[in-house]
Amino acid sequence: MDMARNKAKKTKTNKSRGAILDAAAFLFSQHGYKGTTLRDIAAALDMKAGSIYYHFSSKEELVLEILTIGLSNIIDTVVRDVEALPKNSSTKEVLVTAAKAHLFALLEKGDYTSTSIRNYGQMPEAVQKEGLVIRDKYENMWRKWLQQAQDKGEIKKSINLKVLRLSLLGSFNRTLAWYKKGEMSVSDIAESQVEIFWSGIAGDK
Amino acid sequence: MDMARNKAKKTKTNKSRGAILDAAAFLFSQHGYKGTTLRDIAAALDMKAGSIYYHFSSKEELVLEILTIGLSNIIDTVVRDVEALPKNSSTKEVLVTAAKAHLFALLEKGDYTSTSIRNYGQMPEAVQKEGLVIRDKYENMWRKWLQQAQDKGEIKKSINLKVLRLSLLGSFNRTLAWYKKGEMSVSDIAESQVEIFWSGIAGDK
DNA sequence: AATTAAATCTAACAATAGTTAGAAAATTTT
DNA sequence: AAAATTTTCTAACTATTGTTAGATTTAATT
């Protein structure tokens, strides 16, 4: 009957919806998608499993949203920080900035990103497909940066860019497996990693 | 009654026991531990789930054996190849050799190793614990090699060895996620990766 | 060929999973 | 405060899971 009415319904839904996402991201990152039940997630919030269905229509929808948030967060952070650099920044500066941004997003909002990066295999196919799309977009950015740097002579011609890109992102992402809060700062880790890739490790003797 | 008799019972058991391990490793690596059912594994071999219990006493025992095989395979291969080098080999030679051995083990017996390296979280605690023991042993080898190389001046003093070790192994292991048979050879990937770490990527301009 | 042992199957059990419909409680709006 | 709406709970259903005991088949040994 009445058509224009429910536009900006300030549904207070968003409170526990966010709480559910957080709890689910944490548990997924800890025990995997299949290893986490809706009852586990509900219990972490003093709720019952059935209640989750008021906010999400399925377990799959829940994990899809976590995946999207996790991956987008990395991309957005990296893009923002890199674009904020002066136009004439050196490749190394870009690398350090991107590395720091990537690691910050990865290790701070860690529950979302690690859910996204590990355990592809156990997720429903539709979710995997969506993840690939986002990841490809991100990898293409890196592909472009590295190619431009090599064209300008700031990266040796002899370097295989595919191996480089995958080694870089591989060692960034693997940080998830060993990073412990309080030991080394995210910033130091990023600088250390870029320094290794940039200058190599060979001694002078 | 008769005591010494069943010493080397050439039980023909070993045939389908191995087949079960192979099928399980493949499925685990593809869909994760929790995402693979005993019925899936049996079906892949035209068997029924119950039959698996003639060879293994539980799903946990099955995955534990796969994990042990996968990790030990990497360690054994790497140790064998590195120890076969002449005593006076350079650090870079050691690195290239170790990288190749690691990647070969990782990518050839890939089902076992990738089951072992991904998806820790979903495995039973006892299995995780065992995996950590083996992994620590391996990481300690690398720790030793890198430390000696730095002491001898073959790796810059300024390099943080912890970050280096984890970056190296991280990018090796991440190869699992992108390696495709037929594109780049395992050998080339290993050499490429070591070259990047060894000499860095900085151009001369 | 008969007997023994090895391997698989059948058929079920109990536990747990995602999911759902409707009742109950909590919150917001009037 | 009454009414309407939003949120959570209850309680169940169905499918699937790891697992088991016993019957059955296949292979090895005598």
Image (cartoon, coloured by chain):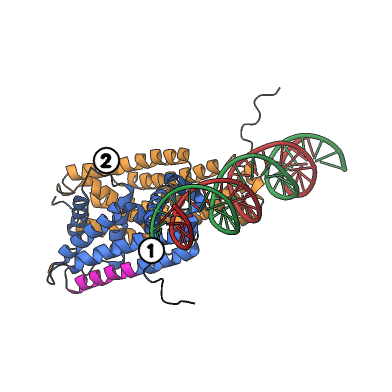
Chain colours: A blue, B orange, C green, D red
- The reply to the same-chain question for discs 1 and 2 is yes
The 10 Å Cα crowd at callout 2, few under 14, some 14 to 19, many 20 or more, is few
Residue type, label 1: Ser
Q: Which residue is mark 1?
A: B185
The 10 Å Cα crowd at callout 1, few under 14, some 14 to 19, many 20 or more, is few
Residue A193 at least partly seen: yes
Residue type, label 2: Lys
How many numbered marks appear? 2
Chain hosting mark 2: B
Q: Residue at x 29, y 65 (%)?
A: A75
Residue B128 higher or lower than A67, as above or below: above
Give the quadrant of residue A133: bottom left
Q: Which residue is mark 2?
A: B144
Work out which quarter of the rendered image holds the C terminus of chain B and state it.
bottom left
Give the x, y percent position of residue A83. 19, 69
User: Which span of residues is magenta-colored?
Assistant: A137-160
Give the x, y percent position of residue B72. 43, 43
| Element assignment for label 2 | helix
Determine if the magenta segment contains residue A102: no
